[in-house]
Image (cartoon, rainbow, N blue to C red):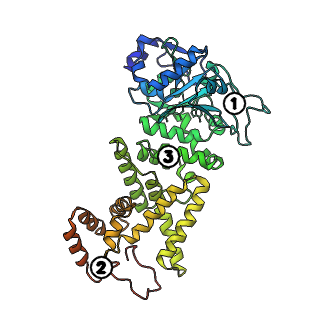
Amino acid sequence: MLRKLIQRLTPTKKGHHKKTMPSGPQIIPRDQHCISRNNISESALKVLYRLKNAGFEAYLVGGGVRDLLLDGHPKDFDIATSAHPEEVNALFRNSRLIGRRFRLVHVLFGREMIEVATFRAAPQEPGHAQHQQSETGQLLKDNVYGNLDEDALRRDFTINALYYSIEDFTVRDFANGLDDLEKRQIQLIGDPESRYREDPVRMLRAIRFAAKLNFDIAAETAAPIHKLGNLLDHIPNARLFDESQKIFTSGYAEASWNLLQHYNLATHLFPFIPSPPGEHATQLIIQAMRNTDERIQAGKHIAPSFLFAVLLWHPVREEMEKLQDQGLPPMQALQKAAHCIIEQQIQRIAVPRRFTIAMREMWDLQFKLARRNGNRAERLYSHPRFRAAYDFLLLREQSGEIEPGLGEWWTTYQEADETERQKMVTELAPHAPGRKKRRRRPKTKPSNPQD
Ligand code: ATP
Ligand code: MG
């Protein structure tokens, strides 16, 4: 569909595609593209029409256009308009102004949120109050409004600078985004290095889109990433949390993680994870991400804290072992190690407390799941975090970190009826792990956490 469209429209352009700022947009009429109002959410249409009827320009932009052209399902719909944020806010009672660095309006329709951004202008001379840059070139404020052409060139990638007009239903392509959709490549608009310096999160976005769309990152867009990773260290931890959530919970975590490793960016997000992580850690992380992706693609629920627990497990284990070597009993060592790793990790990525609580419970249960005697098994089974901890345990066994066995016991236990369960508990050999705490613990650390 897309191929035909581009061949029809740009027969002379083939082979010499412009990389940077073209002079005017390529305009694709309604009957030559596949975007139909039927595929656009009603809420987005409402916003577009109300803006238009109030005399403003209004376009659908970003993922909404890109993913529809690719025959996909947009995650959300973003709108670009000539109306200023306060004007948008005044038009919609169900809206709120957000952002300082980049002022936006969110219009809320139940659980759906439509993001409305005012056209941005090109960067201004230094000293402009609404356009501030840091020493590294990072844009601290980008609130100088402009027109549609200017807005297009402020966007990150060519494939994200496609606009669908509510006025005449055309698609406007300002940066050869259609060419790149066809070539299946992620390409920054403008000079890659300065665009990353303006906003280092674009490096993460390049990876996220490459993973999600299964596109390549164009060579010039990819090249600076290897050396600019440290710019991520200056990004506020709340923004990195939002971005990491998008990376891990959009159904393409595994591919994204591989790219994060490839471009050496993972270490800027998770300073405790060695690059590459050890063999068991790699197995654990990849398998957990694969499972998460499968669950998301099957429309199942995922616990967002799970992947953070997986990612930080080996660093926590290592810290715990160090503390045990210093003489701390295992559970105390675990508590302290968990606290220490989490406290430092949240400086980088602001993982909310409700997540870190869940992570600590999952870690705790890795040890407790071994102690099944008496009525402990039943109590553990009704723990709200049991399911996640059990999944985690299976993954650890699969990764080769620990001997398999305990996971299978719990699998059988869950499938068994009450009598069988009691039998399973009584049959636990007296020397089974966790059967009875020895009064005196040896000073040396246990060889595996089930001990
Ligand atoms: P998805 O919603 O599927 O994650 P998207 O492309 O819609 O993808 P959003 O984060 O919703 O991404 O942003 C909407 C649009 O805003 C983008 O397509 C892009 O044009 C622009 N944009 C977002 N973040 C940036 C950025 N950091 N720099 C430049 N432009 C950006
Ligand atoms: Mg979007």
Alpha-carbon distance for marks 1 and 3?
Answer: 26 Å
Q: Which comes sooner in the sequence, label 2 or label 1?
A: 1
Figure check: 133 above or below 412:
above
Alpha-carbon distance for marks 2 and 1?
Answer: 65 Å
Residue corresponding to mark 3: 245
Figure check: 449 above or below 11:
below
Q: Which comes sooner in the sequence, label 1 or label 3?
A: 1
Alpha-carbon distance for marks 2 and 3?
Answer: 40 Å
Counting from the top left corner in percent of width and height, residue 177 is at 51, 24
Counting from the top left corner in percent of width and height, residue 229 is at 60, 47
Tell me: 200 left or right of 2.
right
Q: Quadrant of residue 117?
A: top right
Q: Secondary structure at mark 3?
A: helix
Q: Estimate how packed mark 1 is, as few (under 14), some (14 to 19) or many (20 or more) residues with alpha carbons within 10 Å.
A: many
Residue at (54% x, 44% y) in the render: 243
Picture quarter with the C terminus: bottom left
Q: Secondary structure at mark 2?
A: loop
Residue 432 seen anywhere in this rendered image of the structure:
yes
Is there a contact, CB below 8 Å, between mark 2 and mark 3? Answer: no
Residue corresponding to mark 2: 432
Q: Which comes sooner in the sequence, label 2 or label 3?
A: 3
Tell me: 209 left or right of 127.
left
